[in-house]
Amino acid sequence: MKRILAIFLCFCIFFCFTACDNAPTESIIENTPIPTPTTTPHVHSFEPATCLNAETCATCGLTQGEKSAHNFVFGECSVCKDYNPTYCPKLYFSGDLTQMTSKKDVRNITFEYKSKDQIVSGAAKVKVQGSSSLGYDKKNYTINFYKDSAYTEKLGLDVGWGKQNSYCLKANWIDKTHSRNIVSAKLAGQIQKKYGLLETAPNNGAIDGFPVEVYINGSFHGLYTMNIPKDAWMFNMDKNNPNHIVVCGEDWFAPVLFREVPNDLGSWTVEVGPENSETLKKIQRLVSFVLNSSDEEFKENFNEYLNLDSTINYYIMINYGWMPDNTGKNMLLATYDGKVWYPSLYDLDTTWGANYKGTGLYSYKNNNLSLNNSLLWERLEKLFKKEIANRYFELRQTILDPKNVMAEFNAFYNSIPAEIIAREEAKWKNIPGYPLTQIESYLNATVPKLDNKYGAWK
């Protein structure tokens, strides 16, 4: 009997465990209500509205309401201190910049640079820049920035080309649109880029710049452009490398026109590199090649002395843009190895038919630009006619299409606020120059003739 009872108990225990395993999967834990998490509601922290932004939450960026109804005065709100991002930067100079007529006259001043994204201040060394422009009432300036008035530590100011210490301020005295120099250089840089030339330089070996207002001792001095200078960084060069050289033609004498091997550096200013006999030898080697080589040698060995692509690009630009002031004088020549030189355009205000005073137009009816008796251009025309023609028509379909040229000029000019143009004209009532419609008229008159001229060379 006891044995039967034990078997029965075991059976009952087994049945209970089996029933539990097959029961629904509800549990005490699952049947217990899950508490709702408690969260702290977000509290917005709105900053006051300004001229540029409505009330904005400092935490999440949510905006509400409208912008303030304040007015910008010369790019700045006197209430909010906002800077209009479409307004051009400003340079404030404090110091004596009166009666500067010599490049050797260097003035020590203080400065503040203000734009939509930065305010930088420090000390600066300033001197006047240019040649004929030294006589104008409104001067060009070369500026070197320093951290303080001890002038022991350079200050790198980054305005789009990395931190640089040296800049050039152009008054653009003979061009009331302030665009010929910059836009012509932009076009030249685009052409160099198209053919993979001087790719490490900021604008492929040409200057670049943007409009800037200049104040001297608190008073508006005028509209300028802040430009890349004739400096090592214009060509991304190492000043300590004796083969990194840039020279500039300073006159119309025989050495600059490649009709006489120079005995000295009198006709060439060394902008980058050592001003010594070794640099002179490098220039003599180049001029002697252009002057003394046979036609066969000139054509076969050209790229050992001058980069052919860069030289043809230069030639086309001076003819297309009517640049008589750049056929010898003002021509930059740059080399990275002391042997092969790259011509580069500089000082492009006497362009697109306007004369060097900005008060008259050259007679470009026959479209025969004087090359000022330069042997370099004479021999290039004679021996590379087909190459010049092919390059011209390549560029005519793209960068040098008249519509593109005018689009570049209009875009630059329209980037200057109208109120600055008005202030400039009120400040400098006798500033000469022509409107952009003159460039359009020039293109309409000359481009068809250039098409015919180079079409005959193909």
Image (spheres, grey):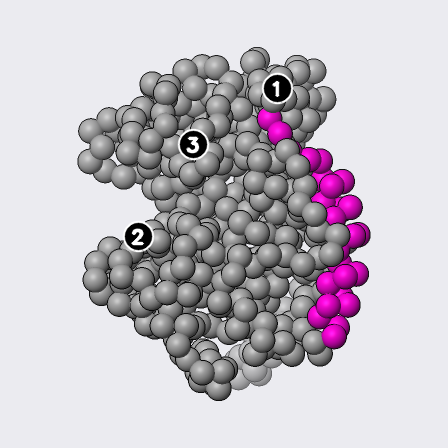
Q: Quadrant of residue 18?
A: bottom right
Q: Residues within 10 Å of mark 2 (few under 14, many from 20)?
A: some
Relative side of 444 to 205, left or right: right
* Image quarter (top left, top right, bottom left or bottom right) of the N terminus: bottom right
Instruction: Give amino acid for label 1.
Output: Lys
- The quadrant in which the C terminus is found is bottom right
Instruction: Say whether residue 238 is visible.
Output: yes
Residue drawn at (44%, 53%) of the image: 252
Pick the front one: 21 or 136: 136
Residue 243 as seen in the image, left or right of residue 30: left
Amino acid type at circle 2 is: Gly
Q: Residue at x 53, y 73 (%)?
A: 379
Q: Which residue is mark 3?
A: 134
What is the secondary structure assignment of the residue under circle 3?
A: helix
Which region of the structure is painted magenta? 431-456
Residue picked out by circle 1: 429
Q: Percent position (x, y) of residue 330?
A: 46, 51
For image coordinates 67% across by 59% down, the residue present is 368
Q: Judge whether residue 234 can be spotted in this image.
A: no
